[in-house]
Image (cartoon, rainbow, N blue to C red):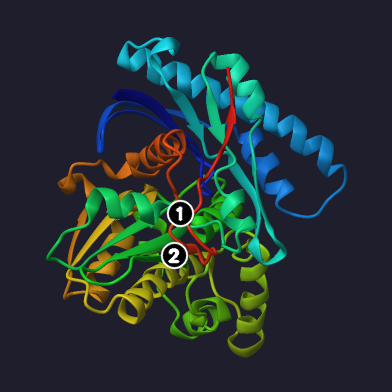
Amino acid sequence: MSEIFIGLMSGTSLDGVDAVVARFDGSSMRLLGEAFVPYPAAVCEQVLALQQIGDNELDRSARLGNELARLYAAAVQAVLQHCTLAAADIRAVVCHGQTIRHAPQAGYTLQLGNHALLAELTGIDVIGDLRSRDVAAGGQGAPLVPAFHQAMFADADIPRAILNIGGIANLTRLQPGLPVIGFDTGPGNMLLDAWIRHHRGVSYDADGAWAASGQCHAELLRILLAEPYFAADVPKSTGRDLFSLEWLAERLERFRLQYGAINAANVQATLLALTAHSIADAIQRFAPHTRELYLCGGGVRNTQLCRQLTTLLPQLHIAATDVLGLPAQQVEAAAFAWLGHRFCQRAAGNLPEVTGADDLRVLGALYPR
C-alpha cells in the first residue's frame, strides 16, 4: 500500500526547518520534494536561552513550542505546494521537534514543538515525541538515524560509514557481518557556528573560510580533545548541554593561563580541527575496517572541513550521500519520515545496539488531526 509522509527536522544547527515528502511503497521509499523554512533570529535566541537554566522556563517553553509549531506548519505548506499535494494526500507529518535539553543520564530528552497545534494548523495527523520511548527503555534516545542509514545505505559486501554533520556529528557503522553501531562523535558545526556568531555576528562560517584564514593551535586542540566524552565507549550521545560556549571558554582560559592569548580566527581553525579529528578518531576506533564514508548534513557545505577529513582519512573513499541516491541535505528529514512510517506499521524504529535501550521499541506518539 502506497503512503505519503512529510518528515520535518530542525536540528542543533538552529538554521531552520527541513521538510521532505516521502512516498513509501512496501519497503521502498521515494522522495517527492523538499522545502526549507529558516528560523527567525528571535527563535534562535529563545532556543539558546532555554538551553540554559533560567527564570520562567515553563512559560517560555510553551510559547516557543507554539511558535515552532507555526514554523513547522509553514514548512508543511511550502512542501505541499512544491509537490502540488493536498493535506488529504498525506498519511502523517512526522516532527522531530527542537531539542532544548538532552539528558538521558537523568532519564529525559526534551524536544519543543506543540504537536497538537501543528495538527490543528495542517489538518494532518502528526507523529512526534520520537525519542522518549527509547529513553524510557534505558536508551540514549539518540542517535535515531542509524536504523534508517542501515535500511537505505547498507551494502552486502563493502564496509561503509555514514557521517551526519549537523550541530552535532553522528556516525553510523555499516559493516557486513557485524551489528550496526551509531553514536555522536562530538561537535559538528555547533562550536564553529557559536564562535563565529559571537565574534562576527553571522550564523555560520561559509565554506570554512574564516577557519581557513587562521591556524590550528596544536596545544589548544590537545586541551579540547582531552574532554572525557571523546574517550567514552558507545553507546553515547551528546549536545549543546555539553559542547557550549561555556565549555569552550573554560578551556580557552586554561590555555591562556599557560600560553597567553590566541586570536579569534586561530580559535576557529582549531575548532574546525576539533570536529575533524574527533570524527577521524571515532572512525579509527569504532569502524577501523571502513572503506567508504558518506557524508550528509549541513557540514557537507563546509569545504574546509571536508578537506581536513580527506587529509586525516586518506584510506577512505569519501563522498556525499547524493551518490547513493539521497541528497545530503535531505537525509535527516527523510529519516524521520521513515520513522513515522515505521510507527504506523507498529514496527520498531530504534536499534538497541546503537542507543543502549533494553530492546526494540516503537517510537513516537500520535496527534490525530
Q: Toward which corner of the image does residue 36 lie, by quadrant? A: top left
- Looking at the rendered structure, the kind of residue marked 1 is Asn
| Residue 177 x/y as whole percent | 22, 71
Left or right of 318 in this view: 109:
right
Q: Which residue does the numbered mark 1 point to in the structure image?
A: 350
Q: Is residue 248 above or below residue 137?
A: below
The answer to whether residue 296 is seen in the rendering is no
For disc 2, the neighbor class at 10 Å (few under 14, some 14 to 19, many from 20) is many
Camera sees residue 103? yes
Q: Which residue is labeled 2 in the image?
A: 354
Residue 232 placed where, x, y %?
52, 80
The C terminus: image quadrant:
top right
Q: Residue at x 61, y 57 (%)?
A: 135
Residue 68 locus on image (x, y percent): 62, 30
* Marks 2 and 1 in Cβ contact (< 8 Å): yes
Q: Residue at x 49, y 84 (%)?
A: 222
Give whichever of 163, 360 is nearer the camera: 360
